[in-house]
Image (tube, rainbow, N blue to C red):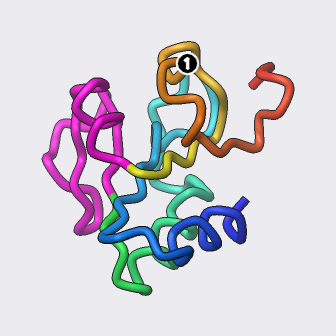
Amino acid sequence: MLSKVAELVYSGMAAPVVGVYRLTMKTGSDSFRASSVQGIMKRIKAKGVPVVAYEPTQDAPEFFGREVTHDPAAFKGKCDVIVANRWSDRLADAAGKVYTRDLFKRD
């Protein structure tokens, strides 16, 4: 998934913004400190690409120096590419820019 995102980000897109939809790994979890998506976020940000996370359970406006938003519409509008650990029907209106490992939409 990371290589596909990197390909899109570096394909000439002007000032791309990569969004991370939910920091948690599993549905119903509130633990995102050990989420594998953090590694993806670090690699993308290390290349100078802005990263924004949508995480409604995170109280702080930032997560390890990355912007966190609670507004799904603003998040989808701001991001050129969205990385999601799992599919959510809330992403349906932005499906063309969503990349997820959850190919069968079963979490």
Residue drawn at the location 35% of the way across and 60% of the way down? 17
As drawn, the residue found furthest toward the left would be: 61
Compared across the picture, whether 64 is left or right of 103 comes to left
- The region drawn magenta spans 52-79
Q: What residue lies at 27% left-to-right and 57% top-to-bottom?
A: 63
Percent x, y of residue 101:
76, 43
The front one of 78 and 87 is 78
Give above or below for 90 relative to 29.
above
Instruction: Identify the residue under disc 1.
Output: 92
Q: Where, by quadrant of the figure, is residue 62 drawn? A: bottom left
- x 56%, y 57%: residue: 37
Of residue 93 and residue 50, the one placed in the foreground of this image is 93
Is residue 77 shown in magenta? yes
The residue nearer to you, when weighing 16 against 50, is 16
Image coordinates of residue 54 in percent, x first then y, are 34, 38
Membership of 96 in magenta stretch? no
Q: Is residue 85 above or below residue 19?
A: above
Q: Quadrant of the C terminus?
A: top right
- Mark 1: secondary structure: helix
Q: Position of residue 29 (x, y in %)?
A: 54, 28
Q: Which amino acid is tagged 1?
A: Ala
- Judged left or right of residue 45, residue 89 is right
Q: Is residue 46 left or right of residue 3?
A: left
